[in-house]
Image (cartoon, coloured by chain):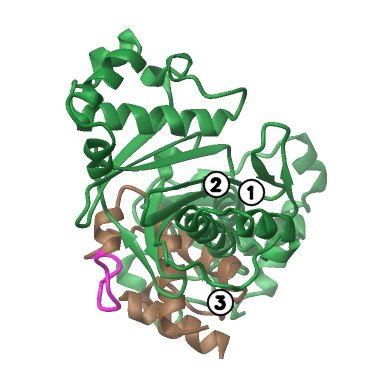
Chain colours: A green, B brown
Amino acid sequence: MIRVRLGSVYHYGIFVSEDEVIAFGLPPVPEYQNHPHRFVVCAVDVDVFSCGVIPEVAEYDLRERRQKFSDRQIVANARARLGETGYNLLHNNCEHFANECVFGEKRSEQTESVRRRWLARPICDIYLTDIVQPCPGEPLYPPQRDAEIRACSHDGLRAARYAAWQLLLFAGRRSLALDPERLKFRKTHSGQWTCDKMFFSLSHTNDVAAVAVSNAPVGVDLEALSDMGRRFPDGGVQQLYDSWLTSGEKQLYPPTDMGFLTCWTRKEAVYKRTGRGSFHPLRVDTTKAEARTFRLPGGSERILSVSGEHAGSAHLFTTDLIKTTLLAPEEI
Amino acid sequence: MTRSEIIEGLRDILLAADDRNTAALANCSEQSRLMADLGFSSVSMLYMVIAIEEKFGIRFDDNVGAADFATLGDVVDYIEKKLA
């Protein structure tokens, strides 16, 4: 078995002689793209097969040497299939063909490695939705969480929690194909809700709920810049900055509302990700944390931070639970 | 599954294939050309078709190749046809 690297993929064939290389399809190069026989098992000479690239000859390990057919049988297997069609890029390609001739087993490491990469891809999706007030009546899953939310006497908080949980169930379905009613939610001793099939984190401002879902521990925090000025007027933010940022953080973040909020949302996101003990700002040092911060588009300026192993792959979406739009926010 | 849901699903796949391309994907449309506009390579094409099979639960027909999909709309058409 030989192969040539053409661009970023390999083309496989069975080498019989310099005048006869049997392969499923012509080499995947532009000059053969519209050739009528490009998806047929065909014999070509080694120059056509290799397209000017030096071919690599397969080296078999002990197990493969035991498993493979004799050279004579391999050639017979390949010749017996000349003229065969039914090429399929994923399920019946040139590598499948060559392996079947050599080992009697259809396999393609190229497609399997890509499939593994897709199935194990890092997922860290963050969804944002407007909080609708008054809180709609449709029950949420699980019933314990639904009852907990409905028992909240503060109208605004109840609506925010309802919107965030509804968004969580939507996000689990959309990003991880999880049926909400098959999920098992559990509340930890520290009062944090967890799920058996995904990692998640919730946050909200007065009017927007945010949810992060991931296949690794994740924390998210959302704050509105305008709320900070209202909640902490007359230099209040500066006092917070002085009191609650570590010395290392003060080197990193400027003493402004934006600087403080960037650091604060990161602290909260990091704390939510680790989820241990009670939150004490000075015990959460963001200087070495895997966290990213975004300035969200829209009228009232909002800052969102996400922390987690897959934060580097984070994507943000806005949704009304029907239409979902990908955002490309400015990263701070 | 509606056409816009297919596009959303497809966008997720493209993001996973190349998460440095968020800005281009945020503005992509059915007319976006996979190679010229979205910077697809043969490997990202392979990734896309495998991910489509997994995400949408379909199987690509024999003889379908990269040359059959010039734009995002071509891919959506194909998925829509397979899901029908």
Rendered image: mark on residue B62: none
Q: In this orientation, which residue lies closer to the viewer: A106 or B46?
A: B46
- Left or right: where B16 falls relative to A84: left
Residue named by callout 1: A198
Q: Residue at x 42, y 17 (%)?
A: A285
Helix, strand or loop at mark 1: loop
Q: Residues within 10 Å of mark 3 (few under 14, many from 20)?
A: some
Which chain contains the residue that carries disc 2?
A: A
The answer as to whether the residues below labels 2 and 1 share one chain is yes
Q: Position of residue B40 (x, y in %)?
A: 32, 60
Q: In the displayed orientation, state which residue is furthest to the top.
A: A247
Which chain contains the residue that carries disc 3?
A: B
Residue named by callout 2: A214
- Which mark sits nearer the N-terminus, 2 or 1? 1
Instruction: State which mark lies toward you, 1 or 3.
Output: 1
Question: Do the CB atoms of the residues marked 2 and 1 lie less than 8 Å apart?
Answer: yes
Q: Residue at x 30, y 57 (%)?
A: A327
What is the span of residues highlighted in magenta in the rendered image? B27-36
Instruction: State which mark lies toward you, 2 or 3.
Output: 2
Helix, strand or loop at mark 2: strand
Rendered image: mark on residue B60: 3
Helix, strand or loop at mark 3: loop
Q: Residue at x 26, y 37 (%)?
A: A228
